[in-house]
Amino acid sequence: MAVNIRYKTKIVIIGAGQAGLSAGYHLKNMGWQVGKDFIMLDGAAKAGGAWQSRWDSLTLRTVNGIHDLPGMSFAETLENGDSEVQANSAVPHYFDLYEKKYGLQVYRPVKVEQVFLHGNRFFIDTSSTAFSALGIINATGIWESPYIPEYPGAAYFEGEQLHTRDFKDVSRFEGKHVVLVGGGISAIQLLDQISKVTATTWVTRRPPEFRKVPFDDVAGSMAVAKVDERVRKGLLPQSVVSVTGLPYTPEIEAMEKRGVLQRFPMFSEITKRGVKWEDGTEADADIIFWNTGFRWPMKHLDLVVPREEGGGIRMSGRLATEVAKEPRIHLVGYGPSASTIGANRAGAAAARELVKTLERFN
């Protein structure tokens, strides 16, 4: 049962992952007091954001980049710079040390259920306590909102349907035929592991593009710019990774040699025993493994964030974190700030811009 105590503050940061911690750091650097001028909420029981839910085989060597939070190097928290340490323990440890070093008190576990506007204040109803604020930085991340597309016949499939977030290790897949859906970095990494212990069929919506040239700063900026352009128009964003292509690594070269990267187009329906394509071809499956990404979990903001036709949100601000039609709300981790390095910069921009906005409203 919710406790009817209402904490009143100026800014509420929802989410204490990379983006939320960055925003908190910069607010504090501007002289704002944590717990008084701004409050940080997080739905997880411990520090670490979504990293604590990643699979054990994801090491610092195989992860797609860990970027330093402002003011504290990630490398200094590792023993002997070990690249084979599990990401699901090393990164949460880093976040925990960061919170303590900068005194970023986080209320957890606190799940935000609904935000509504009354007068000039936002009221934030949560699983335990109610808060009110003049502005919001939403940095909830996407791990808790897995996306599985709807296909005819899915309800009648007699096998298992799993999503990326369900993966812990390959033991669940051994000896079973797996139809793996998805062409992103995580899909490739998990296809590599699973194909070593059982038969797989790889399915993607469009042919994967492998990048055999180095991905430099210029290429990265161009990729982010494409996503940025979409959200400023109010279109639904694409992930940054979807426009960068897949890095051609030694692991991928080895997968090619093993014949694992034979790719099939998307099937048209799901049957009791597997999947079926439009030409009538069928494939049996014990498991359909969806590596189809996540959706931005912003249902709690439905009453305060205006949507464009088609479901997108028109964004503005220096790094496209500001909701154009409600500048007292910043979305960090949406669109171009979805990557870890983007989240750092966007957290700083959101903090600075929101402070200026609130000065105009007061």
Image (spheres, rainbow, N blue to C red):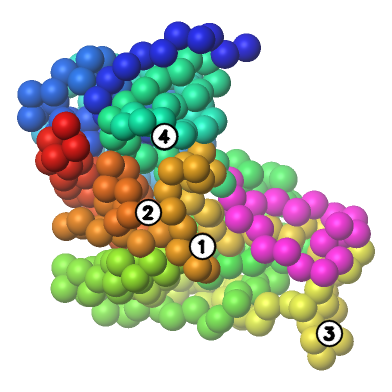
Return the disc, 1 or 4, that comes first in the chain's sequence.
Answer: 4
Q: Residue at x 61, y 55 (%)?
A: 147
Q: In the figure, is residue 246 to the left or right of 28?
A: right
Answer with the quarter of the image where residue 48 lies. Answer: top left
Q: Which mark is residue 281?
A: 3
155 is within the stretch colored magenta: yes
Residue extent of the magenta highlight: 146-165
Q: CA distance from mark 2 to mark 1?
A: 13 Å
Closer to viewer: mark 3 or mark 2: 2
Is 328 placed left or right of 14 in the picture?
Answer: left
**Residue flagged by tag 3: what amino acid is it?**
Thr
| Image quarter hosting the N terminus | top right
Can you say which quadrant of the picture contains the C terminus?
A: top left
| Front-lying residue, 311 or 134 | 134
**Mark 2, residue position:** 334
Name the residue tied to disc 1.
Answer: 311
Label 2 or label 1, whichever lies nearer to me, is 1
Residue 268 makes an appearance in the image? yes
Please state which of residues 172 and 317 is positioned toward the viewer in this rendering.
Answer: 317
Residue that numbered label 4 is attached to: 117
Rounded to the nearest angstrom, the CA distance separating label 3 from label 2 is 38 Å
Query: Could you say which quadrant of the image residue 245 lies in?
Result: bottom left
Mark 1 is on which residue type?
A: Gly
C-beta proximity under 8 Å, tags 2 and 1: no
Whether label 3 touches label 2, CB < 8 Å: no
Q: Is residue 96 magenta?
A: no
Q: Residue at x 91, y 64 (%)?
A: 272
Q: Earlier in the sequence, mark 2 or mark 1?
A: 1
Q: Is residue 348 above or below residue 342?
A: above
- The amino acid at mark 2 is Tyr
Question: In the rendered picture of this protein, how many numbered marks are placed on residues?
Answer: 4
Q: Position of residue 345 (x, y in %)?
A: 19, 49
